[in-house]
Amino acid sequence: MTKTVWIGDVQDGLHDGQTVELKGWIKRTRGSNKMRFVVLRDSTGDIQCVGKKDVIGEESFEALKEALIESSVILTGTVNVDERSEGGHELVVHAVEIVGAVDPERPFPINKEALNVVDEDGNPMPGGSEFLLEHRHLYLRTSRMTTMLKLRSSAFGAIHNYFRNEDFIEYQAPNFVAGAVEGGSTLFEVPYFGRTAYLTQSWQLYAEAAMPALERLYTIAPSFRAEKSRTRRHLTEFWHAEMEMAWASNDEIMSHGEGVVRHIARTLLEERETELSSINRDLDLIARYADNPYPHMRYDEAVEILQGKGVEVEWGDDLDYSKEKILTQDFDLPHFLTHYPKIAKPFYHRVDTEDEKYVLCHDLLAPEGYGEIIGGGERTWSEEEILRRLDEEGTPREPYQFYIDTRAYGGVPHGGFGLGVDRVVSWLSGASHIREVIPFPRTSNRVTP
RNA sequence: GCCGAUUUAGCUUAGCUGGUGGAGCGUGGGACUGUUAAUCCCAAGGUCGUGGGUUCGAGCCCCACAAUCGGCGCCA
């Protein structure tokens, strides 16, 4: 049963002239009354297989003719180099075995018409129609989605590699929590044996509890936010790569943020050049993101630039996406934005001792209109200061008692960041919507399939 | 929470000033010896999102509702 021959290897010329057994799914078929062309697909690629009636016999020929798109088959034959076939290789079929036949009464519902989805302006929105979102479980096997899932896998691998190479320990926090990290209105409530629990919005607070134990820690885990955001950058369940580091300044934390993002870009170039090209992503662009240092800009500078462009923004305003977009439209690299006003950020951000109007934080803004991909900074680390900031905000102390305790017993300067993995993959792949890069996207209007 | 749009066959859609809803893909049947999302011929497949209204007559006009999509706020 084990599969030993992969279509990608056949197309790479590893089996020229050999007789091989190809297992896969039918992507397309066409032909005449004497020969059948079957484009066979597996997880590694596509190949044209040709079944000639006088070679395979009447019965197999009929079987091939009746095999509909997405039937699973095993085709045995000889690998020929043939320019007439896409990819340069072709299988001349000797034997046909239909494994899972598709019923003509209910053929594979996704056809070429269904895949050509455009938005109001006529731009392609792959997978964006209601039909394809309802048939997500079948859409996954189309070539674009397969490519996106491979890019995603490489990105996840790159994050693990980066942090492990930097001696970070992988650490898991609970997903059921009692308190909020961000604003309370974006929490998902979960009934919890007569009480109310929430789905976590971030690993951060629980990571800070482990900071004195592990000193350098990271995770990749889902975070949940009940935001009714209808944008191409938001999911209610997204994958969050977070790190926390003892004895670290805002600058040191940023250098790891830059490091991990550049490592993801580098890894995609090394592992997924073919896939990036197949979706027409400019490889030079990814190389630029991998090879160049990311500029830094203080909040005040950003506000000045925006005001210079005639944007209505006052000091103290948080920079929303519309402003980010204007700010980043001239950027050809991700930029760090630092030193936001204290009034724009929650209690756990550490105040800048050089000027108490600011907090020591950073956002990393991706170019090409993709927006914020990292948010992080130094944490308020003394017990006295965290209590003061909680009170200033009017945030109750009680749910955060464990968090306050971490400061009471040997608080040290520390910080960390959260990176939106789906957003990074979306940006680096050039996706038109974040749901393109996650298999079953969860948005405010959809939890199915 | 706010703003905009869409809903016609399994899918993608056309449908003019209100007068018996067309097509392509897919499916079924047929033709074809090298096709490239093959081509050619034929067939089946529609209570036009739901409910109400106007009208002699509604896919089209009006109202309500629903579902979905796009954008904003918020954020990763």
Image (tube, coloured by chain):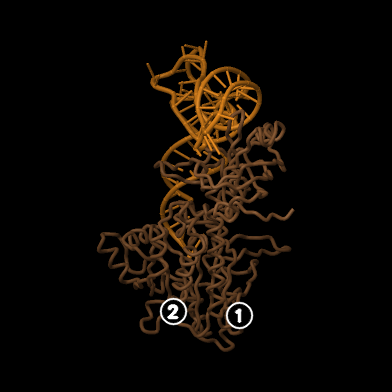
| Residue type highlighted by circle 1 | Ala
Q: Residue at x 56, y 80 (%)?
A: A167
Q: Which sits in the foreground, A112 or A27?
A: A27
Name the subunit of mark 1: A
How many marks are shown on the rendered structure? 2
Q: The chain shown in orange is which? A: B
Q: Residue at x 40, y 56 (%)?
A: A282
Q: Which sits in the foreground, B25 or B70?
A: B25
Coordinates of residue A196 in the picture (x, y in percent): 66, 63
Q: The chain shown in brown is which? A: A
Q: Is residue A318 visible?
A: no
Q: Farthest front residue?
A: A17
Query: Label 2, on which residue?
Result: A250
Q: Secondary structure at mark 2?
A: helix
Coordinates of residue A419 in the picture (x, y in percent): 50, 67
- Residue A392, relative to residue A97: is it above or below? below
Name the subunit of mark 2: A
Coordinates of residue B76 in the picture (x, y in percent): 48, 65
Name which quarter of the figure residue A168 lies in: bottom right
Q: Residues within 10 Å of mark 2 (few under 14, many from 20)?
A: many
Q: Which sits in the foreground, A218 or A201?
A: A218
Q: Secondary structure at mark 1?
A: helix
Coordinates of residue A233 in the picture (x, y in percent): 47, 56
- Residue A427, relative to residue A246: is it above or below? above
| Residue type highlighted by circle 2 | Asn
Label disc, if present, on residue A210 of the rendered structure: 1
Q: Residue at x 52, y 80 (%)?
A: A245
Q: Is residue A437 visible?
A: yes
Q: Is residue A303 left or right of residue A395?
A: left
